[in-house]
Amino acid sequence: MKKYIYPFVFSILLASFTLFVILDTFVISRPQEYVQGQTNNSMFSKSQKSSKEDIVYETDSTDQLADDSAGNNSAASENASDDKENDQSDDTVTDTAQENTNTSGDHSMITDDAQLIGEYRNDGASIKLYKYYYENTTVYAADIIVSSSEYIRTAFANGYYGKNVTAKTSSTARENDAILAINGDYYGARENGYVIRNGIVYRDSSDGEDVLCIYADGTMKIVSPEEYTAQELVDSGVWQAFSFGPALLQNGQISVTTKDEVGKAMASNPRTAVGMIDSCHYVFVVSDGRTNESKGLSLYQLAAFMQKIGVNTAYNLDGGGSSTLYFNGEIINYPTTSGKSMKERGVSDIVYIAK
């Protein structure tokens, strides 16, 4: 009889443990609004949304992140042609990989190695994607102008909020019809830290780190969780909030030192960051690292790069093997953990612009 008791007890224990893991992963850790797709659009009004013309890049503006090649007749002709095409179609993508050489304007991100590698425009967003080689590292920067911060969206892996729920950035991007996406703050890897997505509070416990807030009015601020609860932030108009850090730039000034680092991370890493030039004018930055071609960036180098391209407020998101940039159906950077092979790491969430 004893020979049947032990297998029976073991089976009961195994089933109980499996049930606990399932509940802990998919049920226990979720608030009522755990299903992706919940949004608090009430914080947006028509007056906050500008017309389509407001998001078109003007080549004579010194406030834009990147000018097209000024003084180049052929480039001007191409731009005129592009504008004509955009008048005919509200949804266009251009992958030109053309060199961009204009250095005019104090706030231009153009350097000798800046290369325009992609463009996109729809009714609510205009995107230009650039490639750089900075501090022995390939760096990608997406210049994003939106008519409303409502177009800066987030999505959870597999469509759910919860522990141990992960998916590749590219997979989550495709599921949400994203044209541009980066990995988020990997909230699922931590027990604490505010999680506010699309105007809804999913986690209101603080981890003590500064919080990046994107407001419904198009602005971006970095705040202390000691000063505001998560619900107070939403009540004040916060559309998206991320808890990872640290802050890289505030009021255009570098907020980190050469000695700052994230936990036990190496000094030079693949990096992901988000920043703001001005209201409704954002930047997504992803750098490679840990390879022979790209050393990777320190936090200070990342901050210095973003300051160089004219960013006013910037915040560090999850990096290392998580760092991924997705654009127009493809992975643009070289995601890697060991440097030996290109491999995306599964993460909890993404930040994206929809088609």
Image (cartoon, grey):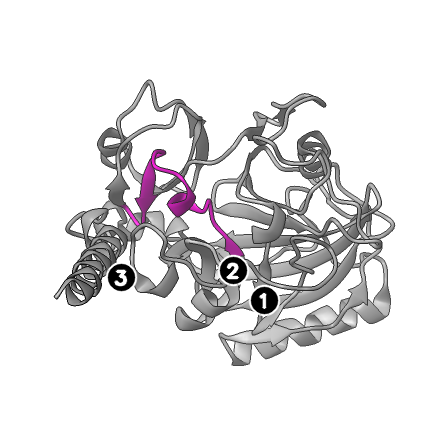
Q: If you read the primary sequence from the N terminus, does the residue marked by circle 3 or circle 1 appear first?
A: 3
Q: Residue at x 65, y 58 (%)?
A: 335
Which residue is label 3 attached to? Answer: 37
> Magenta stretch?
182-199
Q: Which mark is residue 327?
A: 1
Q: Please give the residue where the numbered disc 2 appears in the rendered image.
A: 181
Q: Are marks 3 and 2 in contact (CB under 8 Å)?
A: no
Of residues 255 and 22, the one nearer the viewer is 22
Instruction: Determine whether the residue tagged by mark 3 lies in a helix, strand or loop.
Output: loop
Where disc 2 sits, the SS reads strand
Determine contact: label 1, label 2, CB under 8 Å.
yes
Q: Locate residue 206, reporting x and y percent.
A: 33, 28
Identified by mark 3, the residue type is Gly
The picture places residue 30, in percent across and down from the top left corner, at 21, 49
Reply above or below: 324 against 249: below
Q: Amino acid at mark 1?
A: Phe
Residue at image point 53% right, 42% down:
317
Q: Quadrant of the N terminus?
A: bottom left
Q: Helix, strand or loop at disc 1? A: strand
* Distance from Cα at disc 3 to Cα at disc 1: 22 Å
Name the image quarter holding residue 130. bottom right
Query: Residue 319, position in %: x, y?
Result: 59, 45
How many residues crowd mark 3 within 10 Å: few (<14), some (14–19), many (20+)?
A: some
Asked whether residue 147 appears in the rendered view, the answer is no
Residue 47 in view, yes or no: yes
Relative to 181, 241 lies left or right? left
Q: Residue furthest top?
A: 227
Q: Is residue 39 magenta?
A: no
Q: CA distance from mark 1 to mark 2?
A: 7 Å
Query: Residue 183 magenta-drawn?
Result: yes
Q: Quadrant of residue 135?
A: top right
Residue 53 horizontal side relative to residue 249, left or right = left
